[in-house]
Image (cartoon, grey):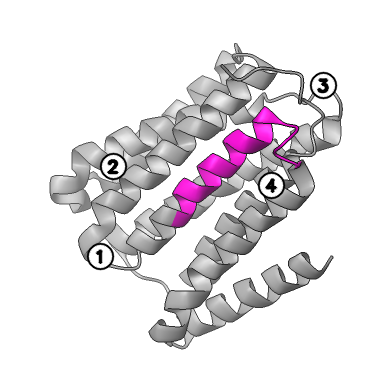
Amino acid sequence: MPIFILLIISASAAIICSYLNYFRIFLWLKPLTTILIIISAFQIGKPEKSLYTKAIISGLVFCLLGDVLLLNDQFFIYGLISFLIAHLIFTYSFIKIGGFSSNYIHAVVLLIIGILYYAFLYKSLGQLAIPVLLYLLVILLMCWQGLSFECKSSEVHGRFVHVAVILFVISDATLAYNKFIVSSDSSPLLILGTYWTSLFMLALSTQCNISNRRLV
């Protein structure tokens, strides 16, 4: 698949440029990689036939906007809002297609982990304490619903969502640690690798044959 090869090349080059501090090149490669994932979702999911695909692509577009905004620290809060909207869209899609998850074990475990991690970050958050808390609650909700997502036509495609939400949480947790606690030389690979893999898994999940299910 040519688009997949381009995606691998773009993602790898972006990570390498991040390590080497080639910011001007990274400035272009980061959004380009996410754009290639969005194109993949169009090719895989056929949005003209699937409302779920349209919703996932909408969420991916907000991720792209967040990517661009986070390239400048002055726009961090706006990038946070963009990703928060993306998570809300993903959550809505999972619930409407797979139904609301009543697995409260997942919810309790995620909430405990979230509270502990937020407490760890809290002293370093400053004025961002409330926005980060709201974002944390939303991404945990997204992860909770995504872990129980079921694709009626294919268990494999449902698994893509399960992997995606876990990787997204790992990526954001690493990003928060890198930004608010201490920067690590290995962070670009972990943050970007898990992030783009998560988005690609969501793109792959659009193969679910759910065109006859309404999202509204």
Residue at numbered disc 3: 152
Say which of marks 4 and 1 sits in front.
4
**56 falls in the magenta region:** yes
- Give the distance between the C-alpha atoms of the residues marked 4 and 1, in whole angstroms: 28 Å
Residue at numbered disc 2: 132
Instruction: Tell me if 151 is positioned left or right of 26 in this view.
Output: right
Residue type of the residue flagged with mark 2: Val
**Which percent across, then down, holds residue 153?**
86, 25
Whichever of labels 3 and 1 marks the residue nearer the N terminus, that label is 1
Instruction: Tell me if 140 is positioned left or right of 119 in this view.
Output: right
**Which quadrant is the C terminus positioned in?**
top right
**132 falls in the magenta region:** no
- Give the distance between the C-alpha atoms of the residues marked 4 and 2, in whole angstroms: 26 Å
Whichever of labels 4 and 2 marks the residue nearer the N terminus, that label is 2
Secondary structure of the residue carrying tag 2 is helix
The residue lying toward the viewer, choosing from 42 and 68, is 42
The magenta segment is 46-64
